[in-house]
Image (cartoon, rainbow, N blue to C red):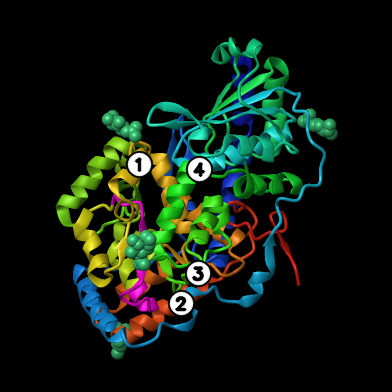
Amino acid sequence: MKQRMRKMWYRRRVTGVGAVIGLVACFFLMNWWMLSRIPDSGLRLKYKFVRGNSSKILVPEEKGKLVEGKRPQKTIYERLLALAAHALAEGQKKPEPKELWEEPFVPDSSWRPCSDQRNWEPNEGNSGYILVSANGGINQQRVAVCNAVAVARLLNATLVVPKFLYSSVWRDVSDIYQEEHFINYLKPDVRIVKQLPKELQSLDLEAIGSVVTDADIMKEAKPCFYLKNILTILHLNRVVHFVGFGNRLASDPIPFELQRLRCRCNFHALQFVPKIQETGALLLQRMRQNATNSRPLDHYLVGPFAKSKMKRKRGRAVKASRYLALHLRFEIDMAAHSLCDFGGGEEERKELEAYREIHFPALTHLKKTTKLPSPEVLRSEGLCPLMPQETVLMLAALGFNRRTRIFLAGANIYGGQSRLAALTNLYSNVFTKENLLSSSEIEPFRNFSSQLAALDFIGCTAADAFAMTDSGSQLSSLVSGYRIYYGGGKMPTIRPNKRRLAGIFLKNNTIEWKVFEGRVRKAVRQTKRVFSRPVGRIVYRFPRCTECMCFTE
Ligand SMILES: *[C@@H]1O[C@H](CO)[C@@H](O)[C@H](O)[C@H]1NC(C)=O
Ligand SMILES: *[C@@H]1O[C@H](CO)[C@@H](O)[C@H](O)[C@H]1NC(C)=O
Ligand SMILES: *[C@@H]1O[C@H](CO)[C@@H](O)[C@H](O)[C@H]1NC(C)=O
Ligand SMILES: *[C@@H]1O[C@H](CO)[C@@H](O)[C@H](O)[C@H]1NC(C)=O
């Protein structure tokens, strides 16, 4: 049976080659179009996925107009950092720019969350059972869970509570999210059970052809794919097991109510377990220096702990303490994958090459056999992750004063303390979850990277401003979606257009601070605006669309 299914798909795939070529061309045009519409295109557009014999190879996309860039000189950054230090020292007395902590364009506030509204009947879920074993980090898994919920509803199937892969151990959703809430909240949409029924548990799913891996489903598959192929398996075997399930459901076209269900799942049905909520609330309290004003959004992140903390402090009003969250995501995998040069000389180049050979063999192979854009070109095109030096220069140029409280998510900065020093030299109030929490408070989480990542998620999402310097990561993308959904237009996300920043950094190495500041502010202001969801973009990142939010005059 399995053989037959495989063959069936295979044949479709082969006869579809012509169509695929056409699609790729379309995709290209689409990318170009989106690039011109959304200034910050991010990693997502940086690579297109090309199907090799079996594995996926990442091919940096050729751009229409490649500008031969100049090598980033260390001295440019050093010079600018010195200017920034001077400007920040001077700036102590000056007020911060007015729009620094705000989202521009006020009408945005009239979008409000409404994906909790349903307009359909409950579903029996009697066409079969869907199992999901999601891999990737906690944020990829979150996307996989909500996509699985939508697929289950689409196929009238029953969903078995998804499993997560953590460092080669399968664990339950209940390590991170409140399982009962998940099941009950979505009861009117999909039937969710904790386990497969007894009679199906003993089946060898692999042998009967019910295991469907990411190699069997194209990325962003359309609903018709599931209706054609997966429903057939469900009818034959009563059960399908998705393994991996990374980004396997398209953003468009999706029926309205199904799209709304994805939003409902992401923004309403997944709540962190009390243990994470409690510690998350502690983290927020410390970032805000015991300030009494909680954000409306806190409730969705830390549940009852948002309130109880506040109650205890009643009567002792503490002045609001704002903070900025920053996710640098300048980690070795990102650095190696980007093929960029970060000014660390021969040693760094070798180190990144060695990392690529082990972790991205397809990329190494491609690099040897194809002429890829040079690191200089990649940089001038804004395709390199921002280095901590560049990020801190951007923050200083925007006008964040040196006392600004900064929450730094993740912390494995490539190049370690020496690269981070640029940040801590200019800003003295930089915190991470590790230094906000005592060792006994963080101990219960230490062995669980996903739970630690959940704390970062809370720290970033609740921040008064969030700087998303890595438009590619799933954390930043979910965090900014959450801020749009619950933020009422008052929780700005700073998304620099890296291409423009690269232009500012590289063009002029005699630039004066005032000029630099003006250009950076202008570049960032343009991307701070929150757009409605562009076609083809994911609702978890761009919830401002009629499926997820309602517009009131
Ligand atoms: C699911 O159920 C609905 C209502 O009972 C029905 O209209 C629809 O065709 C079913 N879809 C599938 C894929 O079975
Ligand atoms: C916040 O409250 C805790 C406990 O009540 C106290 O130890 C700490 O000093 C307070 N911090 C600030 C900045 O007020
Ligand atoms: C974490 O792992 C270490 C070593 O494997 C173990 O000794 C410790 O008890 C674990 N801590 C928790 C909270 O599970
Ligand atoms: C560099 O910037 C300065 C002002 O900061 C300007 O006078 C000069 O003309 C610029 N040079 C180039 C090559 O753009």
For label 3, the residue is 315
Tell me the kind of residue under disc 2.
Answer: Leu
Tell me the kind of residue under disc 1.
Answer: Leu
Q: Do the numbered discs 1 and 3 sit on residues whose CB atoms are within 8 Å?
A: no
Q: Do the numbered discs 2 and 1 sit on residues whose CB atoms are within 8 Å?
A: no
Q: Compared to 67, does 242 lie above or below?
A: above
Q: Compared to 402, does 13 lie above or below?
A: above
Q: Is residue 483 visible?
A: yes
Marks 1 and 4, the one that precedes in the sequence: 4
For label 1, the residue is 363
Judge the density around disc 3: few (<14), some (14-19), many (≥20) Cα neighbours within 10 Å: few
Q: Is residue 401 magenta?
A: yes
Residue name at image x 35 percent, y 55 percent: 373
Q: Position of residue 381 (x, y in %)?
A: 40, 64
The span shown in magenta is 395-412
Q: Compared to 61, does 501 lie above or below?
A: below
Marks 1 and 3, the one that precedes in the sequence: 3
Q: Taking 236 as reference, is 429 left or right? A: left
**Quadrant in which residue 43 is drawn:** bottom left
Tell me the kind of residue under disc 4.
Answer: Pro
For label 4, the residue is 274
Along the viewing direction, whichever of 36 and 129 lies nearer the viewer: 129
Foreground disc of the pair 3, 2: 3
Task: Give me the C-alpha separation between circle 1 and circle 4.
Answer: 42 Å
Q: Tell me the SS state at disc 1.
A: helix
Task: Give me the C-alpha separation between circle 2 and circle 4.
Answer: 33 Å
Q: Tell me the SS state at disc 2.
A: helix
For label 2, the residue is 100
Along the viewing direction, whichever of 50 and 196 lies nearer the viewer: 196
